[in-house]
Image (cartoon, rainbow, N blue to C red):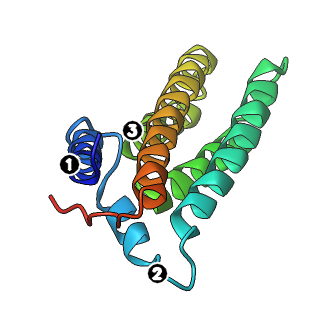
Amino acid sequence: MDLTQMQRRLVDYTSSLFREGYLDDQFTQLQQLQDESNPDFVFEVVTLFFEDSQRLINELGEALDQQNVDFKKVDAHVHQLKGSSSSIGAQRVKNVCVIFRNYCEERNTERCMRCLQQLKHENSLVKTKLETLFRLQQQILTAGGSIPMWSE
């Protein structure tokens, strides 16, 4: 595959992530903060997000497994995850967090457990999608090309 094809593939793939609601404009803004002085900025921020989100998801699981669920604690974890997913543009993760917080307010353990499963699923999906995106970008850079800026 030549460089032009790889770049086209990257643009198409990125477009699909926005179209399918995995990412929102915040991701684009994050990309705009990256420059020659910090070429791995987006990758590093996203990597930190996934480390943090995994920790929060584990803590949510533990908190919801308790005999007496501390919904304030659960809500605090969900609120934190909503903020961090929002900051990298992980739209579908953020959307689940919004619903999750409503169930915390209602103190509905069963619905919270379902949201936790949905959160694990969406987090895993967006992680895989972004890993693919970074791999495509790396292939272009390795081939001596530049990353085409994507716009809606």
What is the number of the mark on residue 88?
A: none
Q: Nearer the observer, disc 2 or disc 3?
A: 2
Q: Amino acid at mark 1?
A: Arg
Residue at image position (52%, 41%) is: 131
Q: CA distance from mark 2 to mark 3?
A: 27 Å
- The kind of secondary structure element at disc 3 is helix
Is residue 69 visible to the viewer in this orientation of the structure? no
Q: Earlier in the sequence, mark 2 or mark 3?
A: 2
Residue 19 is situated, as x and y percent measured from the top left of the image, at 20, 40
Asked whether the residues under the numbered discs 1 and 3 touch, taking CB atoms below 8 Å apart as contact, a structural biologist would say no
Name the residue tied to disc 3. 92
Q: In the shown orientation, is residue 141 left or right of residue 26?
A: right
Determine the residue located farthest toward the left in the rendered image.
Answer: 152
Residue 133 appears at what percent x and percent y? Answer: 42, 45
Cα separation, mark 1 vs mark 3, equals 25 Å
- Going from N to C along the chain, the mark reached first, 1 or 2, is 1
Rendering coords of residue 120 (x, y %): 58, 26
Nearer to me, 85 or 82: 85
Q: Mark 1 vs mark 3: which is more N-terminal?
A: 1
- Label 2 CA crowd tier, 10 Å (few <14, some 14–19, many 20+): few
Q: Quadrant of the N terminus?
A: top left
Q: Is residue 4 visible?
A: yes
Does residue 84 sit above or below 59 in this rendering?
A: below
Q: Amino acid at mark 2?
A: Asp
Task: Tell me if mark 1 has few (under 14), some (14-19) or many (20+) residues whose alpha carbon lies within 10 angstroms of its own.
Answer: few
In this view, the mark in front (1 or 3) = 1
**Position of the C terminus by quadrant:** bottom left
Query: Which residue lies under the disc numbered 2?
Result: 35
Which dot marks residue 8? 1
Q: Position of residue 36 (x, y in %)?
A: 49, 82
